[in-house]
């Protein structure tokens, strides 16, 4: 996630799923003046990570 040019920092964590296994959620702090869309961050991850590591949820936050 942090390799995305508009991302300053991020944190990934598991959130409970209705299906029993946790799903991946990432909180993203954008670089100053940048505003990545959650779908853009997820697509960036889809292109670089195994499917089980791609976040199901992306939240843009001011700080971690």
Image (cartoon, helix red, strand yellow):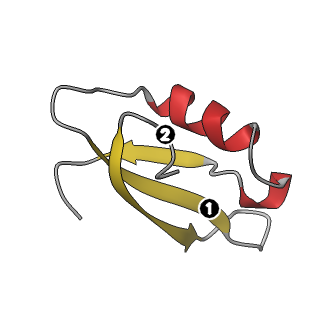
In the picture, the disc for residue 1 is none
Real-space CA distance between mark 2 and mark 1, rounded to the nearest whole angstrom: 17 Å
Quadrant where the image shows the C terminus: bottom left
Tell which of 48 and 56 is nearer to you.
48
Is 48 on the left or on the right of 57, as rendered?
Answer: right
Residue 27 to residue 4: above or below: below
Residues packed near mark 1 inside 10 Å, few (<14), some (14 to 19) or many (20 plus) = some
Estimate the x, y position of residue 5 in percent, counting from the top left: 42, 35
Dot 1 falls on a residue whose secondary structure is strand
Residue at x 42% of width, y 26% of height: 37
Q: Around disc 2, counting alpha carbons within 10 Å, would you say few (fewer than 14), some (14 to 19), or many (20 or more)?
A: some
Q: Quadrant of residue 31?
A: top left
* Residue at x-position 81% and y-position 60%: 52
> What residue appears at the point 71 percent right and 62 percent down from the top-left corner?
18
Side of 51 where 40 appears, left or right: left
- Percent coordinates x, y for residue 10 in the rendering: 39, 58
Q: Which residue is mark 1?
A: 24
Identify whether 40 is placed above or below 64. Answer: above
- On residue 4, which mark appears? 2
């Amino acid at each position: 996630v942090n390799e995305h040019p508009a991302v300053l920092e991020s944190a990934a964590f598991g959130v409970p799923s209705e299906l029993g296994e946790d799903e991946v959620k990432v909180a993203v702090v954008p670089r100053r003046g940048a505003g990545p869309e959650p779908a853009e961050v997820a697509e960036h991850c889809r292109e670089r990570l195994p499917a089980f590591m791609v976040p199901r949820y992306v939240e843009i936050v001011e700080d971690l």
